[in-house]
Amino acid sequence: MQKIDSATGSEIRSHEWDGIQELNTPLPRWWLWTFLVTVVWSVAYWVVMPAWPMIGSYTKGVLNWSQRDNVSAELKLTAQARRPIANRLVAALPADIESDPQMLEFALASGRAVFKDNCAPCHGSGAQGFVGYPNLNDDDWLWGGSLGEIEQTIRYGVRNANDKSRFSEMPAFVKLGTLNRTQVADTVEFVLSLSGQAHSADAAGRGSVLFAEHCASCHGEGGQGDRTQGAPNLTDQIWLHGKSRIALTTVISNARNGSMPAWGERLSAADVRALAVYVHSLGGGEPEPGQ
Amino acid sequence: MTVASLTAAVQQDTASHGVETAAVEAVNAAHRRALFKKRGKIHPKRVNGAFRMTKWAMMALTLTIYYVTPWLRWDRGPGAPDQAVLIDFPGRRFYFFFIEIWPQEVYYITGLLILAAVALFLVTSLAGRMWCGYACPQTVWTDLFLVVERAIEGRRNDRIKLDRAPLSVEKVAKRTVKHAIWLLIGVATGGAWVFYFTDAPTLMGQLLTSSAPSEAYFFIALFTATTYTLGGHAREQVCTYMCPWPRIQAAMLDEESLAITYRFDRGEPRGPHKKGDTWDGRGDCIDCRQCVAACPMGIDIRDGLQLECIQCALCIDACNEVMAKVDRPRGLIAYDTDLNIARRQQGLPTRFRFIRPRTVAYALILALVSGVMLFALLKRSDLDVSVIRDRNPTFITLSDGHIRNGYTVKLLNKARSQRTISLTVDGLSGAALTAVGLPTADDGSLQVPVEGDDLRPVRVFITLPHELVVHDSMPLSIVARDEAAARPIKVQSVFLGPKP
C-alpha cells in the first residue's frame, strides 16, 4: 500500500526507525543517465589516455598521449619559427642591429627573457647590480660598453677557465706584503681625492706617490681606469665594491676579483647576441668603436 | 476542479453569450504546487487586440534590428572596416557607427550596461516588466515559434487534440514540418549572430560556398541549438526557472507601479453568466478562463501579481474580447495597481502617480550616467599616452654623478594615419630627455613617429644633474604634443633620486 506525503506529493517508504520515516525521492533521470555516461566515459578514458600509476611507470593509453612530448614538440616548433630571424641576428653586424626594428624587437624580447633566466641572480632582475656585481644600467663599463664588447664579455666571461675569458688580477697588497697598513691608508686617501670625496690632503699627497708606483699601471696615471684590463675608473661616482674608506681599504688590502661564467658555453649564439642587445639598450650602451 | 475535469481540456460552453470557456487551470495553481513538478505543456491561445498588435509591431521591430544591423555600412575611410556595427576580436576593436572603442576603453561598454540596467529599473518601476513582455529575445522568439506552431498545427484546441492523438502519418508530417521550420529559424538566428563579429557580406559569401572559418559554423550550430531548445521547447521555463530578473524585479516595483492586474474589485464574485440574466450582485468575470488559455506562461492572472507573469498583456486582449461579447466595459484585466483597487473599494478615484521618489531617482541616475558618458565621448582623444616608471631600479647614478630615471611611454595612435608625437618634460628644470633608438631634437624634445591605428612603446630616460636633485621624489609631467597642434596631453609622474 503506497502512502503519499501530503506536503511534497512523494511516496513514503514502508520502513520506519524510531518514528522517522523516509520519503522516496529518486534521483532525477537526467542526472542518473549523466552519471552513468560519465562512468562509461571514465572507463574509456583509462583505455585511451594515460591513467593508472604503476611501479616506476604508468599506463600509457592507446593514444600514447603525453603532455611532455607536446611541450617539447611545441618548443621545437617555436625554435623553428624563430630560426630565420635568429640566424639573421647572429649574422648581422653589431652596428646594424639597432637600426632594424624587427630584429631589434626580437633581440630585446628574447634578450630580456634570457637575462631574467640566467643573469638576474647576480645582476638583479632590473640589471641594477649589487655590491661586487656591476650595475648594467649606467654608463660605466669595466670591459667596454659597445655592443661588440658587451657581447664578448658575455660570451667568454670574466676570470674563468675559458681560454678567451676576460682576465686581469688585482694584487692583494697587504696579504702579499707589498704595502703595509699605513701605506694602504695613505693610498685610500688619494683614491678618495680622485672622485672628489672628503680626504686628508697630507695623506693623499703621500698616497699619490704610492698610487703612481703600484696602481697607475692598471688604473692609469689619473686613476681613469683601463678597459682593456677591466680596471675600474676611480674618478667617477660609480663604485663596484663601495666608495667608503673601509670598502676601499678592504679592496686594496685583500683584492676583489669578481668572476662571470662564459655564457657562450651554455647559451646559443643567438641568445648571447640577444642578451648583448638587451644589456646595451638598458641606458648605458655606447656606439661601436669607430662610429 | 478535479483532475478528471482538467484532462477534459477541450470543453465548450456556448450557453454563456457564445463565449468559449476553456477548461484550463493555471500551471502554478495553489493546490497543484509541489516541491518538484512535472512541466505541463502550455498551448497559448491566439488573441486579437491592441496589445497583440503592439507585440506584433515590437516583434517586427526587434527582429528587424537584429537581422538588419550587421548589414548596415558605415564609411570609415581606407583600411578600416565599413560595417556599422562590428565586434572585431582579432583586431581588438568595437565599431558602432561613428564610435570606435579600443580594449582600453572598455569602460564605455560598462557605461552602456549601467545605462541599460538603470533604464530597465526606471521602466520597471513605472510599468512593470515591459522588457519581459515586449522586448526580451526569449519572449520574441517564443512568440515567433508559436506563430509557426499555429500555422502548422492549428488553433489551441487543434494542438491539444494533436498532442493527444496517436501516432499517425499526419501527426508525424506536421511535427516534422514544425521542427524543421523551428530549426531553420534557429539557423537564421545563429547565422545573423556571427555576422556581428566579422564582415557580413564576406562571411555570407563564405557560408554560401562552404568556405567559412570553422568558428562560424560552430557558433551557428550553437545558437541554432539554443534558439531551438529555448524558443521551441523550454519556453516559459526559461523565465520561471532560469532567468534571475523575475526575482530581481520585485525590488524595483512598488505599490504604484503599473502591473497587469485583474480588477477583482470589479470582477468578483465571478461565475458563469447566461444571456439575459442580471449583472446585479455579481462581478463581471464570467470565469471563462480565456485569460488563462491565452497566457504563454500558463498562469491565472486572477491569482494576482506573481513571479511567473511576464506582463505580456495578452490576457488583457483575451478578456477584452470576452467583455465585448458579454456587453460589459473593457478593462476587467488592465494595467493598474493594487493601490487603485484598494482606493476604489474605499470609494476614492483611480490615481496614477508616475512621478515618485523612486522614479525620479532612477531618472536622475540615468541622466547623470548619460551625461558622464556623453562628456567622456566628446572629450575622447585619438591619442592616448600612458607612462610607466621603471621600478627596478628606481634610479641610476651615472659616472658623472647625474641621476637618471627610466620610463616606458606608451603612445596609442587611434587615428588612421601615421603621425609624429613630440615628447617633452615639464615641471623639472634641467632635465634632459633621451631615448633608446631615437635622437633627441635640438630643442630637447623627442620626435616619435607612430603608425596609424597602432601602439608604440618608447623607453625614455630623464637625466638630472645631481645638484638639481633637491628631493628624493620630484613631480614632473611628460607632455605629448601632436604635430597637428591639438591639445597637448600631460601625464603626471615623478623623478626619484637619492635622499639629498
Image (cartoon, rainbow, N blue to C red):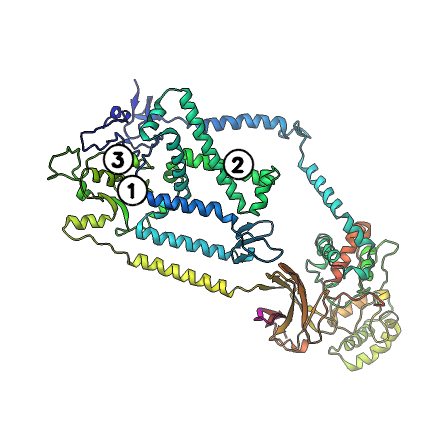
3 or 2: mark nearer the eye = 3
Of residue A33 and residue B136, the one placed in the foreground of this image is B136
Residue A283, picture quadrant: bottom right
Looking at the picture, does residue B426 appear above or below residue A122? below
Confirm whether the magenta stretch covers residue B486. Answer: yes
Amino acid carrying mark 1 in the image: Gly
Whether residue B312 can be seen here: no
Identify the subunit bearing mark 3. B
Residue A274, picture quadrant: bottom right
Q: Which residue is mark 3?
A: B290
Looking at the picture, does residue A194 appear above or below residue B457? below
1 or 2: mark nearer the eye = 1
Identify the subunit bearing mark 1. B
Q: Secondary structure at mark 3?
A: helix
Q: Which residue is mark 1?
A: B49
Amino acid carrying mark 3 in the image: Gln
Amino acid carrying mark 2 in the image: Ala
